Amino acid sequence: MIDLISILIFSLPVSSIESNCDNKENLSQTDLNICSYKVYLTSKKRLSNILENKTLKEWNKVSNQVCREVWKNYKKGSIYSLQVNRCQTKMNDYLFYSNKGGMKGMDERYKLN
């Protein structure tokens, strides 16, 4: 019976076994990278609510290039995509929350001191 269950589990496509991004303590580096990409996509979607499509496309291209260059020393490492995703997410969030909160209502995480 256990063999049958094992065969069924291992025959499932990888995409059907999804990482629990809410609990990152025991995730592999690959799962952390996947979760960071999902968070990035959420920030990109938020930003799409305030930027015009043309501007958003250019921003995505430029921010990706900038983050890849900033983290280029880690390009051959397992954390490279995680750091690039986090970099883009932080920049997207800064822009979104700056727009949303204005000068006086800015989210504390994104205020520049």
Image (cartoon, rainbow, N blue to C red):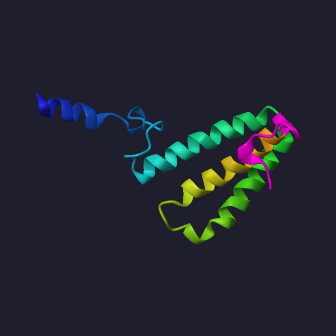
Q: Name the quadrant of the C terminus.
A: bottom right
Magenta-drawn stretch contains 102: yes
Quarter that holds the N terminus: top left
Q: Image height check: is 94 above or below 9? A: below
Tell me if residue 93 can be seen.
Answer: no
Residue 101 percent coordinates (x, y): 83, 35
Please name the residue shown 27% across and 38% down the image.
Answer: 10
Q: Looking at this view, name the residue that lies furthest to the bottom.
A: 73
Q: Is residue 53 magenta?
A: no
Residue 102: x and y in percent read 87, 38
Q: Is residue 20 visible?
A: yes
Which residue occupies the extreme top position in the image? 1
Name the magenta segment's main secondary structure. Answer: loop
Instruction: Pinpoint residue 60: horizontal percent, then vertical percent.
Output: 75, 48
Give the left or right position of residue 8, taking residue 89 as reference.
left
Give the residue drawn at x 13%, y 32%: 2
Q: Is residue 5 above or below residue 99?
A: above
> Is residue 64 left or right of 59 when viewed as pictured?
left
Q: Quadrant of residue 4?
A: top left
From which residue to which does the magenta span run? 99-113
Residue 65 versus residue 5 in the image, above or below: below
Labels in figure, total: 0
Relative depth, front residue between 12 and 24? 24
